[in-house]
Image (cartoon, grey):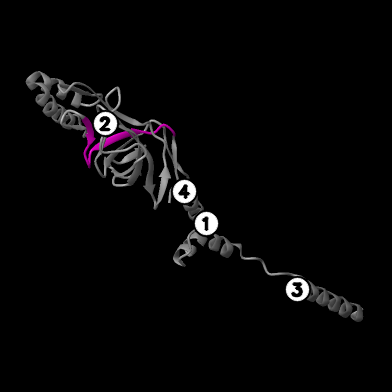
């Protein structure tokens, strides 16, 4: 009887010992939860940007890099770098200038004032040399942006003058025509020349006459060109 009791106690002791060795301590989930909850804070303290903020910033940067489109019909006003004229210039001659007014798309300035431009004189005929009077036609070809020349397509800007003898001359477009008419009524041929020059200045286009014969666009005159095709600008 006594031997059986001792055997039972030994068996029970061995069973408890084995059970104690195979059991694992409980996992402390509260520590993990606390560490997960402060991950973004720890990243910020360590100088590392949280992942969601980084992704948002990258998306904004990609959006800024998308090209902006300047639609057809947009007006680009240019200040001429040198004088152009029906007698001064020749067909095929190039000219330079600068953008005199910011060009914006929405609230964003896409072509800033002061940008360098280049263009071509597509037609230049002095008064009296060809039938139909004097004519001057210019076209804008490119705008320098971000260090390179961007080709553009614009409608040609035309100026014409018709004369009969030496007493009358009319400039098509701007205030010069009205000035010439007033001058002719006031003082004949001489008055027409004076009135034409004054009217051109009042018209804002900068067009004038030397005497009553030829069209002249003085240096720093503003000439507006209209884009005939949309222009895609890459953001830097």
Q: Can residue 84 be seen in this view?
A: yes
Q: Earlier in the sequence, mark 1 or mark 4?
A: 1
Q: Which of marks 3 and 4 is nearer the N terminus?
A: 3
Q: Which of marks 1 and 3 is in front?
A: 1
Q: How far apart are labels 1 and 4 at the CA level?
A: 21 Å
Left or right? Give the position of 144 relative to 49: left
* Vertical placement of residue 97 versus 41, above or below: above
Can you give x and y, in whole percent of width and height, for residue 128 in the image?
Answer: 25, 26
Instruction: Write down the residue under mark 2.
Output: 126
- Few, some or many C-alpha atoms within 10 Å of disc 2 (few <14, some 14-19, many ≥20)? many
The secondary structure type at the circle numbered 4 is helix
Left or right? Give the position of 169 relative to 121: left
The secondary structure type at the circle numbered 3 is helix
Can you give x and y, in whole percent of width and height, for residue 174 in the image?
Answer: 22, 26
Q: Which of marks 2 and 1 is nearer the N terminus?
A: 1
Q: Residue at point 89% right, 78% down?
A: 7
Q: What stretch is highlighted in magenta?
A: 214-229
Left or right? Give the position of 135 relative to 152: left
Q: Residue at point 38% right, 48% down?
A: 145
Q: Which of marks 4 and 2 is nearer the N terminus?
A: 4
Instruction: Write down the residue under mark 1.
Output: 51
User: Which quadrant of the structure image shows residue 163?
Assistant: top left
Q: How far apart are labels 2 and 1 at the CA level?
A: 70 Å
Q: Which of marks 3 and 2 is in front?
A: 2
Q: Is residue 100 visible?
A: no
**Mark 1 touches mark 4? (CB < 8 Å):** no
Q: Nearer the viewer, mark 2 or mark 1?
A: 2
Tag shown at residue 20: 3
Can you give x and y, in whole percent of width and height, for residue 91 in the image?
Answer: 35, 36
The secondary structure type at the circle numbered 2 is loop
Q: Nearer the viewer, mark 3 or mark 4?
A: 4
- Few, some or many C-alpha atoms within 10 Å of disc 4 (few <14, some 14-19, many ≥20)? few
């Amino acid at each position: 009887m006594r031997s059986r009791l001792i055997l039972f106690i030994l068996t029970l002791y061995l069973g408890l010992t084995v059970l104690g060795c195979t059991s694992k301590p409980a996992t402390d989930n509260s520590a993990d939860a606390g560490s997960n909850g402060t991950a973004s804070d720890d990243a910020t303290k360590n100088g590392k940007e949280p992942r969601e903020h980084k992704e948002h910033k990258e998306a904004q940067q990609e959006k800024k890099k998308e090209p902006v489109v300047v639609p057809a019909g947009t007006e680009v006003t240019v200040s001429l770098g040198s004088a152009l004229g029906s007698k001064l210039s020749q067909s095929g001659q190039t000219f330079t200038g600068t953008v005199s007014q910011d060009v914006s798309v929405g609230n964003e300035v896409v072509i800033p004032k002061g940008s360098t431009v280049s263009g071509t004189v597509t037609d230049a005929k002095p008064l009296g040399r060809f039938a139909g009077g004097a004519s001057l036609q210019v076209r804008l070809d490119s705008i320098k942006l971000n260090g390179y020349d961007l080709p553009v397509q614009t409608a040609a800007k035309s100026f014409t003058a018709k004369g009969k003898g030496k007493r009358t001359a009319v400039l098509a477009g701007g205030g010069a025509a009205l000035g010439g008419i007033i001058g002719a009524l006031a003082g004949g041929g001489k008055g027409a020349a004076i009135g034409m020059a004054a009217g051109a200045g009042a018209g804002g286009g900068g067009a004038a006459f030397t005497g009553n014969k030829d069209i002249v666009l003085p240096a720093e005159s503003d000439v507006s060109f209209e884009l005939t095709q949309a222009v895609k600008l890459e953001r830097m």
